Image (cartoon, coloured by chain):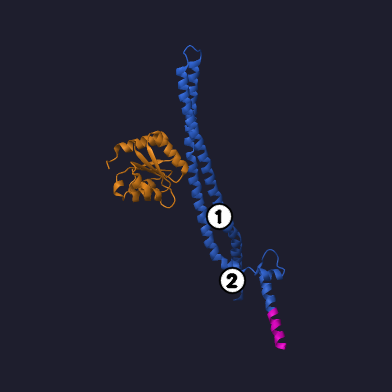
Chain colours: A orange, B blue
Amino acid sequence: MSARILIVEDSPTMRKLIRSALEEGGYRVAESEDALQALAVVQEVAPDLVITDVNMPDVDGISMVSQMRTFPAFRSVPILMLTTESSEEAKERGRAAGATGWITKPFDPAQLREVVGEVLSVRAPR
Amino acid sequence: MSGHASAGADALQAVLGFAEAAFTTMRPACGTTLPSVVVTLQGVIQATEVAAQGVLDAVDRSSATVERLRDRVAVLASATPPAVPGTREACDDVSRSLDVLATAIARIRDGMQFQDLTAQYVRATIDTVAGLKEQLSQVLAILSPVADEQKPPSRLATKLGAPAIVTPWRQQLADLLMEERKTHNAAKATKA
């Protein structure tokens, strides 16, 4: 069965583009339009991987990662940040919060699928 | 001593004049212009979002059509007798054209990422403008007692035939006239 990926992104355009790129790679995709919604549904969706934006209203992506890591079932689920933020300071905050990797927008769909494939292949068993 | 007092009064007058001018300039900017800029920029984000969704829907339909055409060309290529001249070349040409179309469609889809990227810059601008408006509001709150002091009550100003532009000397004149009227009325009451 193909891996399930949760996209957390406030831009409908980006959600659609990321979904399109991932479905082309055969992945199953679920969406949340902000961090609060993602935190509410993540345990029910039980994704194998989460891809999240950083700049979102109310709760930003890095804070969401911190909160997600407090859920016992999500301590080892890979979380990729997909964002326009590219500063080392932001990346360091992401790492400290528990992010697995960092991809800068605009993204190349083929590269995104490649990174997702690599991350899923080395992920720790849940 | 009186020279110092006069200089102080001049300085105070200058400060009051500056405060009033600043107030006159900033109040419409804070109350109307900056909020209008924020609304306009938010509208720009929404409009580009709607446009991008429309383009992506068209891209999805185009991609599906290209795939369907690929299938049809394959069916035609296998069903056409090899003896028919030019058939194989035509099918190959159509397949190559569909590849070109598919590549172009993929580029259009990828290009739509710039809607989100530009929207983020516009959002940062909106935040800056909103912050500026907030700071101006605070400055206005500080200046308003000084600036409001310079304004005559509009009803009295109208009665006195005040000009359209409010000037401090009109208020002084109004105060003087009111004072004179009060004195006059008081004298009349005393006589009566």
Residue B103: image x %, image y %?
47, 29
Q: Residue at x 45, y 25 (%)?
A: B71
* Residue B76 versus residue B59 in the image, above or below: above
Residue B86: image x %, image y %?
51, 14
Part of the protein shown in magenta = B181-192
Residue B66: image x %, image y %?
48, 28
Q: Residues within 10 Å of mark 2 (few under 14, many from 20)?
A: few
Q: Specify the quadrant of the image occupied by residue B27.
A: bottom right
Chain letter belonging to callout 1: B
Element assignment for label 1: helix
Is the residue under label 2 in contact with that under label 1 (CB below 8 Å)? Answer: no
Q: Which residue is label 2 attached to?
A: B8
Q: Which is in the foreground here, disc 1 or disc 2? A: 1
Q: Nearer the viewer, residue B97 or A54?
A: B97
Quarter of the figure that contains the C terminus of chain B: bottom right
Q: Specify the quadrant of the image occupied by residue A80.
A: top left
Q: Which residue is label 1 attached to?
A: B35
Residue most toward the front? B79
